[in-house]
Amino acid sequence: MKCIRCGFCLDACPTFRLTGQETRGPRGRIYLVRSWRENVIPFDNDVVEALDTCLGCRACETACPSGVEYGAILEMARAHIEENHLRPATQSFARSQLLSTLTSPGKLVASLKAAGMLGKLTGGKMPGFAAKMLSGSAEAAVNLPVPQGEVKIHDLPERSPAKGTQRYTVGILAGCVMRVLFGGTNAATVRVLQANGCAVVAPKAAGCCGALHLHTGFHADALTRMRALIDAFAPSLDSLDAIVVNSAGCGSTMREYGDLLADDPAYREKAKAFAAKVRDISEWLIEIGMIPPSKPLAATVTYHDACHLAHGQKIRSQPRELLKQISGLRLVELDESDTCCGSAGVYNITEPEMARKLLDRKVERLKATGATILATGNPGCLAWIQQGAQEAGLKIRICHPVELLDEAYA
């Protein structure tokens, strides 16, 4: 009801920019959902398609002068789709299995090993039958993901002591995809925190945060995972100064636990206390006064704003401030740096055509920077932009900002 239909959101919306269609922009999608809620229109295939093509990037929230909480509207409507079986059964099943695999490190490792063998037959692409079940098209543009190191679960020590004088004690989310595909980034995050006087606690029981399920419409599953994560941190929560996250999508959802579990009397207060301690790694380092690293890195770096960091958590300057503290590093701005790259959780798998257009647009702007490194703070962005850069023949390193800090601390 807050939407005044001013249209400021349209220029910020990546899918509206590409299509020019009202139903592919936030204003049109809000109007469809409101019309359904007011019994003006049925929740039919056209409404489902309009919502499916949304990235959930929340750039419209940044642009909106009326404070419309578009992300919550989208999550509510997508939950209605899944709870009322408004898509083909095979597609719903495939999506739930995809989420189950991505958010279970054991399943993800097994799937990656199997996919590695299958990838030799498919040229490294997702098999056509799987792509068709997920998106309705057998022409998926998604490569099978490539882990940083060995295909295994890269667990963190339950406790890592601070280097030098201990200033803080922090928890860390090892994550699901991060724990398998980006184990090196997790390890670098711990070392950077240690170098800044933080003892780091990584509860073994801490699993999925529920972000992917929430954003995709599997609301009940998301809440189950949220409660489990709160329980995993509960024994140490009072002793933690912060819960540090290096994945933008996870951090954005974890900060909203208090609202998402507000109707649960058993978890309402625990969720608020948990959410209040969540910090992105870049935000936390700036907040505590980061110790400047001493080793110079001679490189030209550009930065891509992950959507759930820039628009979801309103964190823009902190990653850039960290990078500027590395001696010898030259930071150049990326045109449309806060425009979605098309990864958007599982969007590049479920909506491959639109995701590919956004990736191509991002890579073209990346070329123009002349940078040798692109830094970004979300695993989906890292993997998707890496694919685009490789296919374009760009000799550029794609990494998390914390990895560069880790190298600068030597």
Image (cartoon, rainbow, N blue to C red):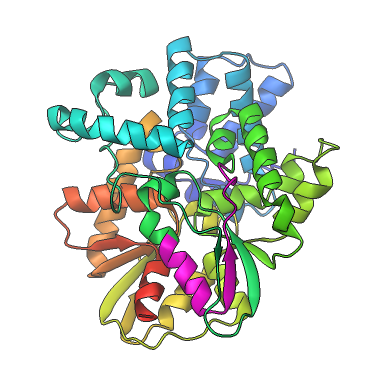
Check the picture and name the quadrant holding the N terminus. Answer: top right
Tell me if 165 is positioned left or right of 155 in this view: right
Q: For residue 211, what is the image quadrant?
A: top right
Tell me if 330 is positioned left or right of 81 in this view: left
Q: Is residue 261 magenta?
A: no
Q: For residue 119, what is the image quadrant?
A: top left
Q: Nearer the viewer, residue 5 or 241?
A: 241
Q: Nearer the viewer, residue 213 or 409?
A: 409
Q: Is residue 8 visible?
A: no
Q: Residue at x 46, y 56 (%)?
A: 306
Residue numbers of the magenta segment: 187-208
Q: Is residue 5 above or below residue 314?
A: above
Q: Residue at x 34, y 32 (%)?
A: 110
Q: Residue at x 28, y 49 (%)?
A: 150
Check the picture and name the quadrant holding the C terminus. Answer: bottom left
Residue 122 position, x and y percent, is 16, 28
Residue 291 position, x and y percent, is 51, 85
Tell me if 306 is positioned left or right of 259 in this view: left
Q: Nearer the viewer, residue 245 or 110?
A: 110
Going by the picture, which residue comes out furthest to the right?
A: 265
